Image (tube, rainbow, N blue to C red):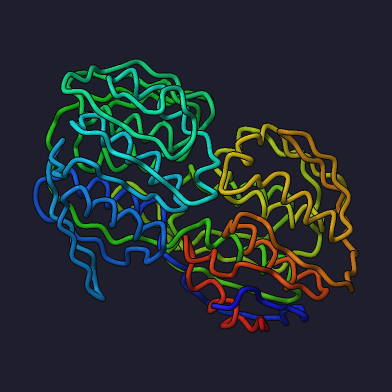
Amino acid sequence: MSKFVIIKKKIEKFNKSIVVESDKSLSIRWALMASQALGISRAYNLLNSEDVNSTLNCLKKLGVKIKKTQKYCEIKGKGLNGYKYKKGLTLNAGNSGTLGRLILGLLIHSPFKIKLIGDQSLSKRDFSRITNPLKKFGAKFYPINHKKLPMQIVGSNHSKPIKYEEIKGSAQCKSSVMLAALNTNGKTFIKAKKSRDHTELLFKYLKIPIKIKKLQNYDYIEINGGKKFRSFNYNIPSDISSSAFFIVLTILSKNSKLVIRNVNTNPSRTGIIKILKLMGAKIKLKNKKIYKGEQIANIHVESSKNIKAINCPSKLNSGAIDEFLIIFLIAAKAKGVSYFKDLAELNQKESPRLKLGSKILNMMGIKTKLTNHSIKIYGQPNIQIDKKFEIKDFLKDHRIFMMSTIAALTFGGSWKIYNPESIHSSFPSFLKVINKLGGRIN
């Protein structure tokens, strides 16, 4: 793949139906849970991306047998605490924060030190939010008090259940503790700020002993660990985070309509739909069904002329945390000033997304006011752009690349966007889908 793409023309009107790549969160969670099950599990439509392949490679190093065909991926589970490996093992999580954080929860009994590494972006991210609760289970991390990768973990033969409060609204932190609890005899109690609940739904589907009490701002979760579970098959639906770019592309394109089929519309992930509808976007969910606890639907979206600004309620943040970059583009075209707050977590992603998102808007001529946790966006409904842009030095963050591509196709101007290979972490066919809709990318 070339070092950059060039976009010089807006996309023309379209009326299409598409399928986007499979859900990354579910693909990674399926693989990790299947590796702990008893028996052979199969996933159909598993996402074939760098993050998922990093997951499979890590599991292979832990002694898990994996078979991939064109139709499915098959994992022969090792059971709880069943991984087999030699001393001196190094696991590479690549760019995946989900993998890096969740797999530590499965290693709290490791008898030898295991080194966890990641790419340049992942190595800048804070892992103390994971290591601190895992230490309470009995795991140890080296170097001592080190907060970032690379680091080593060594487990304990006598892990103990814990009480844990997750205050950041991070599904990765919550899920890592849940996986550690799964591998620990006794009851672990978690008070967690609202975040995506894929792990809870998988636990329920697999009949792992779990109790959940949902309150307005927090969930109380009780896990009775050490209980074995059987292998399972899973047909992975499409990813709403990947769909989000095409939802916004359609809203900002003239006289266009789009149907995105078979998307995971789990309510803990549909913050973008709730936010955009509050801003006046035309979006509907149709053909809804429940699959193994997850809600699946077709997303119908149309061009929307009268977009209005929003003072975004913070309670919607956790359900849209991966989509705010693309929501910012809608705010840039809205009538009025949009305000998004309590978004410090955006700077804990693959890149400092809050800062970079604001920078790109400023380059486009959109005024913003930025703090370390909030942004005001001064919308320009009639903005016309006719200048050159160069987008680079964004830590190869796939969502920065895709945001910039959608901006180029809808706002105009001549764009040179570096690191197109970044999409391989989550959405390898992104540019192909753009091409199907008529976007011209060189």
* Coordinates of residue 214 in the picture (x, y in percent): 42, 26
The residue that appears at 19% across and 40% down in the rendered structure is: 87
Nearest to the observer: residue 209 or residue 284 = 209
Q: How many circles with numbers are drawn on the protein?
A: 0
Q: Is residue 304 depicted above or below 378 in this figure?
A: below
Instruction: Answer with left or right where residue 140 lies relative to residue 387.
Output: left
Nearest to the observer: residue 143 or residue 361 = 143
Instruction: Answer with left or right where residue 324 lies relative to residue 377.
Output: left
The residue that appears at 28% across and 56% down in the rendered structure is: 56
* Coordinates of residue 358 in the picture (x, y in percent): 77, 49
Q: Residue furthest left?
A: 39
Q: Is residue 293 depicted above or below 184 in this figure?
A: below
Instruction: Answer with left or right where residue 201 lies relative to residue 5.
Output: left
Q: Quadrant of the N terminus?
A: bottom right
Q: Quadrant of the C terminus?
A: bottom right
Nearest to the observer: residue 209 or residue 301 = 209
* Coordinates of residue 166 in the picture (x, y in percent): 46, 24
Q: Quadrant of residue 329?
A: bottom right
* Coordinates of residue 103 in the picture (x, y in percent): 32, 41
The residue that appears at 84% across and 72% down in the rendered structure is: 388
